[in-house]
Image (tube, grey):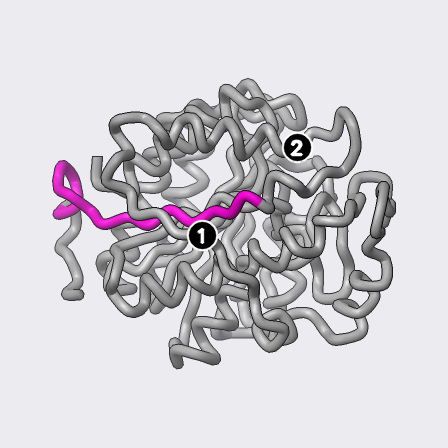
Amino acid sequence: MAPREVGERAGTFVNTLYITHPTALLHEMGEGHPERPDRLRAIERILEGEAFQTLQRERAPLASRESILRVHPEPYIAALEVAAPTTGYAELDGDTTMCPKTLEAATLAAGAACLAVDEAIAGRVDNVFVAMRPPGHHAERATAMGFCFYNSAAIAARHAQAVHGLDRVAIIDFDVHHGNGTQDIFWSDPTVMYCSTHQMPLYPGTGAVSERGEFDNIVNAPLRAGDGGEQFRAAMNDRILPRLEAFGPDLVIVSAGFDAHRRDPLANINLVEEDFGWATAKLMEIADRRAKGRLVSLLEGGYDLEGLSRSVGAHVRRLMGA
């Protein structure tokens, strides 16, 4: 697939793949938990609309153990397997709980991320949106936290390098919470750039501008409570997009959290769905110029169902070239 010129996608058909799996609906963390199956149901409803009928659709496969081991050590994986309950719930921390289907869902989420990379690099599709849960960007090498167990974005990046021979991968994270896990995993790796906008101070307490990585490969652009689209776009334009362009990735991975929406109950950033659409377009332009158009988007947060579904709709419409 030949690279497109900037702006060539606008108003043209783009071949976008949507990956999910019904097992993601079976992962539960208890009554009243914000990371709940209804999140995926809301996304499914919006993507059943007429505007999304040309989406290709595939079910997520299970990730191989080899692909997970590129990020998470064997003792950590084994500890999760031991902790997984056969009935009821097993609490790992105050926010993060396992049910009998959690580990299967997390393994499918990682498998979906790897399949997305395969399809994008092979050129069978232009880009991919993966709607799976649990999310992943808080999962460190050997720590589950923040609703997350396996770091799917990190697993996807390592899969692209190990299986497809890509040299440089960029992960851009616009979830309202900083992706401490992804930062931790790639802190000392010059071949992977991690860029994040997020509210600060806020959970998990990381993501200061001064956190730059051993090779200046970490780019944090924190926002303050009450900031909105103007500040978000400035952070992207002034800090993240120039660094991403200069890095010249072979693949762009998006940790697509939509909890910076003004309706979301877990934070205080006032984005609207058009802001997510704008960011998507900007990342697609850089992917077109630098990465042969290859872009993979992975669902992270977003806990108000209306804000989430509208934002995903704007994100996927832009991926499709609308």
For disc 2, the marked residue is 36
User: Does residue 188 lie above or below 234 as drawn?
Assistant: below
For disc 1, the marked residue is 59
Q: Amino acid at mark 1?
A: Arg
Neighbours of disc 1 within 10 Å: few (<14), some (14-19), many (20+): some
Horizontal and vertical percent position of residue 54: 23, 40
The numbered dot on residue 213 is: none
Q: Is residue 277 magenta?
A: no
Magenta part of the protein: which range?
A: 8-22
Residue 251 lies left or right of residue 303; in this view the side is left
Q: Is residue 90 in view? A: yes
* Main secondary structure of the magenta stretch: loop
Q: Earlier in the sequence, mark 1 or mark 2?
A: 2
Quick one: which residue is furthest to the front in this view?
87
Residue 308 lies left or right of residue 125; in this view the side is right
Helix, strand or loop status at disc 1: strand
Horizontal and vertical percent position of residue 9: 17, 45
Figure disc tally? 2
Please report the residue visible at 76 percent of the width from the left and 55 percent of the height from the top: 144
Please report the residue visible at 73 percent of the width from the left and 44 percent of the height from the top: 146
Which of labels 1 and 2 is toward the front? 1
User: Does residue 98 lie above or below 262 as drawn?
Assistant: below
